[in-house]
Image (cartoon, grey):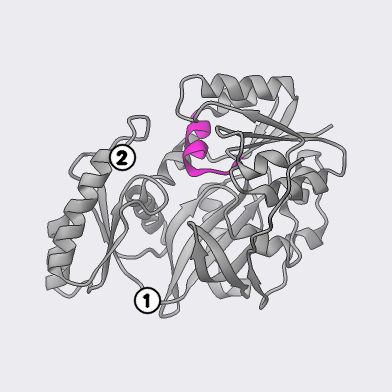
Amino acid sequence: MLNILLTSVGRRSYLVEYFKKALNGKGKVICTNMYADAAAMYVGDISVITPPSHDKTYIPTIIEICKKHNIKLIFSLHDLDVYILSQHLDLLRQTGAVPVLPSAKWGKISLDKYECSQILQENNIDVPWFTVDLQTAKEAIKSKEIHYPLIVKARMGFGSLGLVLCHNAEELDWAFHRVHRQVKKFFYNWLPSTSSNQNVLIQQAISGKEYCLDVINDLSGNYACHFLCEVHSMRAGETDMVSTADRNLVGDLPIRLSLLTRHLGSWGIDCMEDDGVYRVIDVNPRFTGDYPFHQVTGANIPAALISWAQGLEPDSEWLKAESGIRCYKDLVPKRLK
């Protein structure tokens, strides 16, 4: 039996179904969430309510679940949960499970938008112009190194906390100080700390098309494949309508990202097209909301991951998806017994 743990499942019931189908009765999918009535909790083979991921009892609870249910693969579906779990990989591995999670280093980097941009830039991966210093941004505007509009948002976190689009100096000043106050109000002491005067990120806004790039590595951290989609609309923080795109558009960017991170499983990379240059704006070390569009157009990464966990080579067709297909998410009401 190959049992799989999906933590912080939230509304991603489709991923639970993908893994259940891929297991084909040869294992169970155990779901956890801090809320019992999260949609995906109703479709798991076993569902367990846990404390919030930042609670001191959370990691012991997850370890107990892994031991009790003989978990072989662990996935997290929420940014903050990914970070917490990534800081305890050795404890998770001691249960006999493979945590399909970022390293502790990349768990932190993925939350810190400034550090992430720095590391990507140092490794010759294109990113928008960025700074955490308001005066530096003003001087760059004055010298015409950058131009309005600019994006202001929280340096640390998720969900585009405080995101503001600024078109002039007055808006930039207002937004910077507003986001600074928001960060002080909402910042959690269990997140990685930053200097209090460097907790707001300023970026050059890009007006080109938005893309989601999924980079898939095997369980040894080797590049396996990638998928690409153009984002047409978002809803509740997730991709809502896309067109699957020719994966060759982004050149060797996926392979360079794979070699840099050496991650396991699927990572979602948000990019903006800037006059033919694909600039990375966010790194999400988990299955992201755009993955199901590739599943419905031919891919089957859950099945591939299960094969790798069994020491088998996956069907090559599972690593492919059809491009040029417009896809959308629908609301499907479900009745509970």
Look at the image and give the residue range highlighted in magenta: 76-87
Residue 336, x across and y down, in percent: 73, 43
Q: Which residue lies furthest to the right in this view?
A: 25
Is residue 112 visible in this depiction of the protein? yes
> Horizontal placement of 240 versus 273: left or right?
right
Looking at the rendering, in which quadrant would you find the N terminus?
Answer: top right
Q: In this view, does 315 lie above or below 240?
A: above
The quadrant holding residue 197 is: top left
Residue type at numbered disc 1: Ser
Which circle marks residue 284 in the picture? none
| Res 61 quadrant in image | top right
Q: Which of 57 and 71 is in front in this view?
A: 57
Horizontally, residue 120 falls left or right of residue 70, namely: left
Q: Name the residue under label 2.
A: 186
Q: Is residue 84 highlighted in magenta? A: yes
Q: Which mark is residue 207?
A: 1
Give the side of residue 300 with respect to residue 246, left or right. right
Residue 4 x, y percent position in the rendering: 72, 36
In the image, what residue occupies the spot 58% across and 69% down? Answer: 241
Q: What element carries label 1?
A: loop
Residue sitting nearer the eye, 185 or 37: 37
Q: Decide if residue 136 is in sight here.
A: no
**Looking at the image, is 57 positioned above or below residue 122?**
above
Question: What's under tag 2, amino acid-wise?
Answer: Phe
Mark 2 neighbour class, 10 Å CA radius: few under 14, some 14 to 19, many 20 or more:
few
Q: Position of residue 240 (x, y in %)?
A: 56, 65
